[in-house]
Every structure is written in structure tokens, then in C-alpha cells.
Amino acid sequence: MARTEHKSKETAKALYLKGVPVERILELTAVARQTLSRWVNQEGWKELKACYGMTREEITQKILSIVNDAIENPDEYLKRKKIADDLVKLAAAIEKMDKSTNIIHYVEAFIRFEDWLMEHRKEYPELPEEVVMMLHRLHDDFISPFFIKK
């Protein structure tokens, strides 16, 4: 996998886990819909997204529950092993994201701003639609260098 594709995949995954709409992820990462769909389905992103809203304590309890199941029923554990691995990886990813600032943070912040702007448009009648569209375009231009193959 090329470095740029890997970076796009990481960004798409982080945005997906944060609940960013698929259409917006496609715009921000410039990956094909089929590619994103394949990542979501083959790599268990839906399951990870369900866990994403869990606290560290809840994730720890879930992992401990899986460990207990593994001790009591090893055959069942082998079927569920990937879930435990994913939960551990998710906990590590959450911790890593808590400690670092990267392009994903900027994208999320600007998406929140765009969403807020759309919700409060009527409060600012002097704000022309062209400015809103220009902000959206500038945002896309700002993040596109992070995804252009070099």
C-alpha cells in the first residue's frame, strides 16, 4: 500500500469512527466509494465504531470478559479473538489520538464549524451564501496537500 493511500486510509478510518458522514469522508480523502466500503466491511470498522463511544473502563471490562470466556471456552475464544485484538488496538488508538494533534483534529474542528455555520445561518443574514461555499472550498484546498501523491 502506498504511503499516501495508507495516510488516506488512516484518516478515513478516524473520521468514520468519529461519525463523519460517508459523503464527507469521500470528499476529504478523495478515495473511491468502493474502496471506503471495502475498508469498512473487510476491516470491521462498523464494529470498531460501535466500540468507539465506549470508555476505557468499558473497553477494559469487555476485554476482561473475553479473557474470561477464553479460559472457560477456548473454542469460542478462537472465534472471537479478532474482537479482543480490535478492542486492544482501539484502546491504543484512542490513547494515541489523545496525545497527538494531526490533520484529523483540524478536519474534525472545521467540519464542526461548517456544521455549526449551517445550523446558525439564519442568525447571520448578512453572511452571503458565496462566503459559506468559499469556506468549504478553502477547507478542501487546505487539506488536499495531505492526500496528494508525491
Image: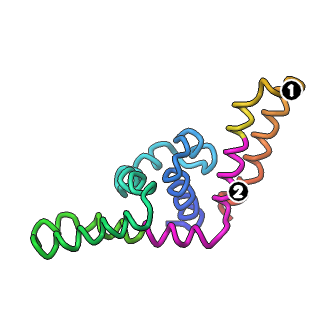
Quick check: 127 left or right of 38? Answer: right
Q: Nearer the viewer, residue 104 or 72?
A: 72
Dominant secondary structure, magenta: helix
Horizontal and vertical percent position of residue 91: 44, 69
User: Which residue occupies the extreme right position in the image?
Assistant: 126
Horizontal and vertical percent position of residue 8: 57, 58
**Quadrant of the rendered image containing residue 104:** bottom right
Which kind of residue does numbered mark 1 sit on? Pro
Quick check: 61 left or right of 129? Answer: left
Q: How would you rate the neighbour count of disc 2 (Cα within 10 Å): few for under 14, some for 14-19, many for 20 or more? A: some
Horizontal and vertical percent position of residue 105: 66, 59
At horizontal 71% and vertical 38% (from top left) the residue drawn is 116
Q: Check disc 2 and report the residue beneath it.
A: 106
* Circle number at residue 24: none
At horizontal 59% and vertical 41% (from top left) the residue drawn is 24
User: Which residue occupies the extreme bottom position in the image?
Assistant: 71
At horizontal 85% and vertical 33% (from top left) the residue drawn is 131
108 magenta-colored = yes
Q: Which residues are magenta?
A: 90-113
The earlier-in-sequence mark between 2 and 1 is 2
Horizontal and vertical percent position of residue 150: 68, 65
Local SS, label 1: loop
Q: How would you rate the neighbour count of disc 1 (Cα within 10 Å): few for under 14, some for 14-19, many for 20 or more? A: few
Which kind of residue does numbered mark 2 sit on? Tyr
Q: Check disc 1 and report the residue beneath it.
A: 128
Local SS, label 2: helix
Q: How is the image coloured?
A: rainbow
Q: Cβ–Cβ below 8 Å for labels 2 and 1?
A: no
